[in-house]
Image (cartoon, rainbow, N blue to C red):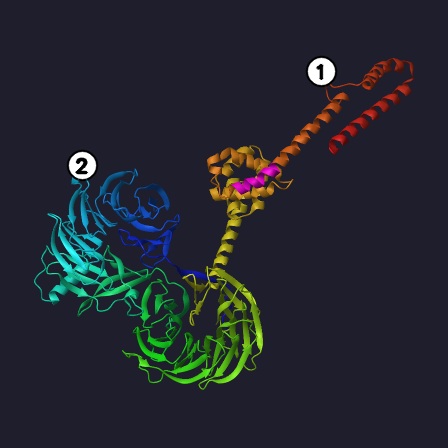
Amino acid sequence: MAPQSLKKNYRCSRSLKQFYSGGPFVVSSDGSFIVCACGDAINIVDASDSSVKSTIEGESDSLTALALSPDDKLLFSGGHSRQIRVWDLETLKCIRTWKGHEGPVMGMACHASGGLLATAGADRKVLVWDVDGGFCTHYFKGHKGVVSSVLFHPDANKNILISGSDDATVRVWDLMAKNTEKKCLAILDKHFSAVSSIALSEDGLTLLTAGRDKVVNVWDLHDYSCKTTVATYEVLEAVTIVSSGSPFASFIASLDQKSKKKKTSSQETHFITLGERGVVRIWKSEGSVCLYEQKSSDITVSSDDEESKRGFTAAAMLPSDRGLLCVTADQQFFIYSVVENVEEPELVLRKRLVGYNEEISDMKFLGDEEQFLAVATNLEEVRVYDVATMSCSYVLAGHKEVVLSLDTCVSSSGNVLVVTGSKDKTVRLWNATSQSCIGVGTGHNGDILAVAFAKKSFSFFVSGSGDRTLKVWSLDGISEDSEEPINLKTRSVVAAHDKDINSVAVARNDSLVCTGSEDRTASIWRLPDLVHVVTLKGHKRRIFSVEFSPVDQCVMTASGDKTVKIWAISDGSCLKTFEGHTSSVLRASFITDGTQFVSCGADGLLKLWNVNTSECIATYDQHEDKVWALAVGKKTEMVATGGGDAVINIWHDSTASDKEDEFRKEEKTILRGQELENAVLDAEYTKAIRLAFELRRPHKVYELFAGLCKKRESDDQIVKALQGLEKEEFRLLFEYLREWNTKPNRCHIAQFVLYQTFNILPPTEIVQVKGIGELLEGLIPYSQRHFNRMDRFVRSSFLLDYTLGEMSVIDPKTDTEYPKDKKIEEETREMEQEPEADQKTPSRKRKSQKSKDRSSKKRLVAEAQGNVIAV
């Protein structure tokens, strides 16, 4: 078997972050995305895979209400700051804001026309606003409690607004009434507690109101009379109408046939209720009959304590037959759909979107294909995620306290088994295929911090606890299809350490087990009798993780002293020490047949190491808190990390893809480079400059501009080349000009191109260039220096003009008046008297005098030129 090639890079392919912190939410008209509150921000979440499509950053305002326009283009938000904001979902910018209520906005609804927005406030008022103008069109008061819900009539021609309040009343308002006393059409006061939800039938003639008094009232909007009252015997948080033609309607029809009821009347109303019990129930208004009720809740509870029960807080019927969306108190979205079996239709939980995971303590991949990921968080349940969609497929619930550790394996019969350790001091064995608990082990006196399956026979698993003991649990005789959990038995027990055991690992041949402890040591024990083999001493702080090498007789430990060590099993000597983390190393795991490993720590980093060279190949920073959990796929060697920031990141080996991308990029660069050379040869300077910018070749750009400056009509050519650049290329141009401007041999080209750039670009476009302020700050000082130098040259050239003019080398201007001293005037007179003297002297002497005059003039000119050059 050929050795695997070393991995050089990992890429984060999928990430699950917190996207919902509870509170308001709203679903798009087609059900494709959900807008929900996450702290101060607003997240737009894809309903298919719970990925955050975009985020609208808030302004330190706790959101209390959200609404969407009918066309899903505008988003309305309100909070404790009393500000009502209108957001454009295409640009994610706030296009309008105003302040209306005297308290927090508790509910919102948009009219079917999209032009009106109704808001309900804690100040007991209901206001209607013009969306475009931002002014109040209607002002309704009369409620004596907080108004929590508001609803427009679905028929745009019926100008009716309905509001529900904590004063146990529902009021119907007339939007067309001019008389103040006639604004309130009716007061519906059959409830005895706060009204939590209101809903209208499809025809708009029937109104349903649900309250915390455990009843649903059905009202006739013709005369505002109460048709019937349905007792549900649970505190209700949501009521929704079942629309005709939906799968739920056919489901109800099948339920009616099964119960042998009379044919459903057209006047009957079917609705769904959800509340504190956490079950979905379908009702028929006539006769107050409950047609369907879930046998058990899909929401897990930690105990029988009333305060710890978690129920539903809101619900919405999704369009396009997407199902029923229910929101839980622990920030989860449940999507139910109807499954029509041959025997009996059934309502099943199709998708579970987890808005918040809390701190993640451990995780492992499930199955041979590793399509699922089991995650232990600060909850009493284990959530199993689909790696492809990152939606929670199911949960394993049964522990009474928080789950601290877990491990997975595939048994000989093909079932996926999961073992979990909890703060309730028990271990549980699960059949993930049937999603049932098949065994419970008791006996530890402390929190169970680590568990591990056997690697070869899968006939046992080990557990390490805060009581400092190591236990081996037998799986012999356990039925994997058992409906009721049986008591697990221990094979052997040993007091392994002086302090808590943080990690355990079993060797590939099931002959050894290693434990890492708070006492800064790791110990190796021989199975099955737990005979001590060797103690590994050398770490300066507690050991968080241990793992056997898949090929060598060695074990790897990760410690709080910021190091990872590899030890020889034979004598317990330290073979290698890896340093690089800036804080405690919390997990480490071998990959690539033991030639590499990955580690994560309290510094939030994931590192890839080479064992042979002790080199850190790559470092990844995708977490904002400690990375407690690390899972490596056995088959795909896919990596998953999770930590204190409640984020789960999935990493894939991108070595091959990166190499292919690099090859394609290099090939493309070569082709574009050849195209650039062809453009230069063809004198297509505009195209050549564009290609040089695309290839990021500043020297080639300089050569092209320098070549253009030497040609005739260079101005037109440069302007034409600059006009073909994009905004990003102009930013690169300013960066290049800043560098050229600092060099004396290139500053002339830089100044000329800069001049032409400012001529063709208006100031409004220049200020839009990214980082233009910093670029101009780098251009201004050197440009000022160049102007000062040219000014000195110009002033120095006047000395040469004066000198040559006085020497009659150039024709002096008649009107130029230069200062003359007495010595110059005397020399002038002598020059005028010299010809008379020359007439009396011999010709040879005159000739020699002329030569002297010429030589003196040449000397003066040379001196003048030297002085100018020196200046």
Q: Measuring 35% from the left and 68% from the top, which residue is drawn there? A: 384
Give the left or right position of residue 674, taking residue 232 as reference. right
Give the left or right position of residue 677, taking residue 390 as reference. right
How many numbered tags mark residues here?
2
Tag nearer the camera, 1 or 2: 2
For residue 549, the mark is none
Verify whether residue 436 appears in magenta. no
Give x and y (percent) for residue 748. Answer: 61, 37
Tell me if mark 2 has few (under 14), some (14-19) or many (20+) residues whose alpha carbon lies within 10 angstroms of its own.
few
Give the left or right position of residue 785, taking residue 604 as reference. right
Q: Quadrant of residue 821?
A: top right
Per the model, the C-alpha gap separating discs 1 and 2 is 95 Å
Q: Residue furthest front?
A: 144
Q: Which residue is mark 2?
A: 178
Give the left or right position of residue 512, taking residue 173 as reference. right
The answer to whether residue 333 shows anywhere in this view is yes
Give x and y (percent) for residue 287. Answer: 10, 61
The region drawn magenta spans: 773-783
> Which element is circle 2 on?
loop
Three-letter amino acid code at the position of disc 2: Lys
Considering the whole magenta stretch, tell me its main secondary structure. helix
Three-letter amino acid code at the position of disc 1: Thr
129 or 737, nearer to the observer? 129
381 or 580, nearer to the observer? 381
Q: Earlier in the sequence, mark 1 or mark 2?
A: 2
Q: Measuring 20% from the left and 68% from the top, which residue is drawn there? A: 341
Give x and y (percent) for residue 325. Answer: 26, 58
